[in-house]
Image (cartoon, grey):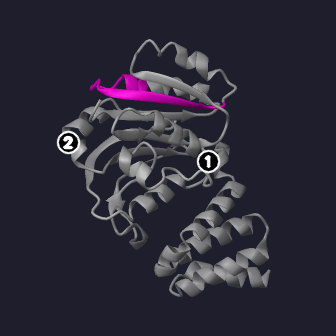
Amino acid sequence: MKEQISIIIPTFNRAFSLNNAIESVKAQTCENWELIVIDDGSVDEPPERVKKYLSDDRIKYFYQENMGVSIARNSGARHAIGDYLIFLDSDDIFFPDLIKNVYEAEFYKYDLICWQVLKVINEKTSLWKPKRLSKMYKGIKASFLSGSICYRKDLFFKVGGYDPKITFGENYELGLRISQVQNLKIKIINKVFLKYEITTSTRTSNSLDNRLSSYLYQYKKHKSNYDKNPKEKSEMNYLIGFVLEKLNRKSAALVHYKNSWLSNPLKIKPLLKIIYLKAF
């Protein structure tokens, strides 16, 4: 069906929250949607949780061996019949008027449609709005947080979808590639339609090893872009240095802190880190 929206929920061992995510889709005041649940090798009975919903022809369930959230999302996109894609994490929920407002915004005229998010991180609540991104992103105004954006499907596949090698920050790495496409048409809806809730201490993707491997891979993959944007290069080197320091790899951390400061001498934090690590 043309101009339909496909919602994709990847899930792995989140039977405790999956029902809420599915119910938030079923509660949409506009009924013209498709929901695809991709089970990424769960062992906590998600098939039983989903089975009761499969009498609704709009809802489909697929199981795969555990291969990570990026491959799960890409798999869902390949199964999608809609021309537009929204990815919803299985521990988040949509508010009821999302799809209605996306249709009213004539989404089919755009490449990306973004909206606001109610973020609850470690029980602290804040409002996340689409914002003007850095020069690396060509200065576009958008939000690439999962569940805060609707993608035109052929654009998603044109840039290669999610990179399976990135396990932390994969949404904005996808956004980085999308932002390089010329003449993007972006629609911003200034309303809140997603509740995004995490506890960082229990989120496996937030582990130091995950963060380090993803930062290093992204830095190498987009090296030419970072070299053209000294402030972003400085920030990425600082993040890598910070994680290395946390892992007690102080010599390697010092190298990246130095690269951070040399890329942007006005940035004081890496200089303070250099002084501290040399002193201790």
- How far from the left and from the top, in percent, is residue 85? 38, 40
The image shows residue 253 at horizontal and vertical percentages of 72, 74
Q: Quadrant of the C terminus?
A: bottom right
Q: Which residue is mark 2?
A: 106
Please name the amino acid that badge 2 sits on.
Glu
**Residue at screen point 38% across, 62% down:** 179
Residue at 38% x, 34% y: name it: 6
Q: How many marks?
A: 2
Near mark 2 (Cα within 10 A), the count class, few <14, some 14-19 or many ≥20, is few
- The numbered disc on residue 246 is none
Q: Secondary structure at mark 1?
A: helix
| Extent of the magenta region | 23-41
Q: Is residue 280 above or below residue 142?
A: below
Please indicate whether residue 227 sits to the left or right of residue 100 in the image: right
Find residue 136 and report its horizontal and vertical position in percent.
43, 71
- Residue 200's tag is 1
Q: Name the residue located 48 percent from the left edge and 74 percent from the top edge.
A: 225
Q: Amino acid at mark 1?
A: Thr
Q: Earlier in the sequence, mark 1 or mark 2?
A: 2
Please identify the quadrant where the N terminus is shown: top left
Q: Is residue 172 left or right of residue 209?
A: left
Using the image as rendered, state which of residue 234 and residue 126 is in the foreground. Answer: 234
Q: Is residue 37 visible?
A: yes
Name the residue at 50% across, 86% down.
Answer: 266
Q: In this orientation, which residue lies closer to the viewer: 267 or 60?
A: 60
Q: CA distance from mark 1 to mark 2?
A: 36 Å
Secondary structure under the numbered disc 2 in the rendered image: loop
